Amino acid sequence: MADTVHILGGAQTDFAVKWAKQSDNPLFDMLEQAVRDCLGVTGLEPSDIDTAHVGNFGGERFAGQSHLGAMIPMLTPAWATLPTSRHEAACASGSAAALAAMAEIEAGRYDVVLVVGVELMRNVAGEEAARNLGSAAWTPEELDSGELPWPHLFDRISQEVDRRYGLDQTHLNRIAELNRTNARRNPLAQTRDWTAEPGHFDADDIANPIVTGRTRRSDCGRITDGASAIVLAGSRFTESWLGGSPGRRASRISGWGHHTAPLPLSAKFTHEGRYLFPNVRQAITDAYGRAGVRGPEELDVIETHDCFTITEYVAIDHFGLTDPGKAWQAIEDGHIDFDGRLPVNPSGGLIGAGHPVGATGVRMLLDAHRQVTGTAGDYQVPGARTAATLNVGGSCSTAVSFVVTG
């Protein structure tokens, strides 16, 4: 029988920091800080860790560095020969690393596994960063438009949602406003201190200019530096660890789902099924099924991908909060507000908290753990015991969902 996988805790760097300004080796230094703080939070010794997995998307392009798994043995002599791996799945790289770590615990190969996601992105100009990120699209076809790759592709998703169901821009504006407001409660969020001018979340061509098509500046996620680390463990070690201190709290990854669609966005639009992205819906329902969760009515909080506001808009109905195409209902009635029936992205999400690509999936799991263990501080959802995450890579090609319970 497969072992149960627990989250013992973790840490993240401050996503507002521009690491290239304060470090000669920012990619390594971010990873080092997240791991060091993770061990401090959990009270673990390096010798407790059996293996490690690193999630990273663009080390080669942004830092000229690959083979990031081999950075882990550099952190302490105790890890001089530690088995490690690096995982890449675009924006879902961190979740891919977590899935691999879970599989090792479930198979009985290891008891205690470190998972860390890291990304350096702010060391280059914005246009170069956009080109680097575009390598997760279908190249070269999806890069030939002359537009910024990801705003252009997710604007096409907005157009497809509008074609199938209708789409009111005011609902996307509200998602942006909610996530930026939530980020103010998060002491590690990239935009926690940002101010919003009048018109910032409206169809104001000065305060909120169009980036491409119908996509405006407030619809777009951040270019972010950051790292996040968690420790996963099997039941036997977790029981012993909990007995070591009365203040320790573990959560459990009770469900997971992982499905992948073809790389080109156009290939995903060839069906007229009930859900726009069947692979995303299946990843979520698989996680529900494995966790014994009937649907969103049994969740207390969601941390979902919102690289653009349309991504969260699509996620709302794919989680089952509304019927397909009716996500606007959950926005209008306050269902997803911080004090709503099912708060979405109390951390601020990618738009508010930041999106260091390889770290995002790990950060979502960490925030889910914090919520269900009552340790999320000022952005704690009262009484949260069950959380779900959704992390997507590319134009919703890779989809990974987890259910975390306290």
Image (cartoon, rainbow, N blue to C red):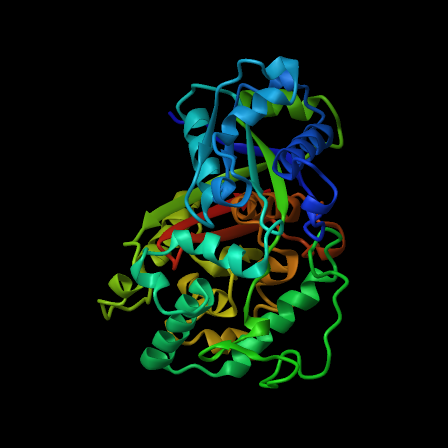
Between 250 and 350, the one lying in front of the other is: 350
User: On the rendered structure, is 147 left or right of 48?
Assistant: left
**Residue 270 located left or right of residue 406:** left
Q: Residue at x 60, y 35 (%)?
A: 230
Front residue of 2 and 277: 277
What is the x, y in percent for residue 297? 49, 61
Q: State the image coordinates of residue 267 (x, y, percent, origin top left).
A: 25, 62
Residue at point 34%, 75% (across, down): 160
Locate residue 28: give its quadrant: top right
Quadrant housing the C terminus: top right
Residue 340 visible in the shown view: yes
**Residue 343 in picture, x, y percent from top left:** 60, 63
State whether residue 326 is above or below residue 392. Answer: below
Q: Quadrant of the N terminus?
A: top left
In this orientation, does residue 347 appear? no
108 versus 226 height, above or below? above
Q: On the image, which quarter does residue 335 sit in?
A: bottom right
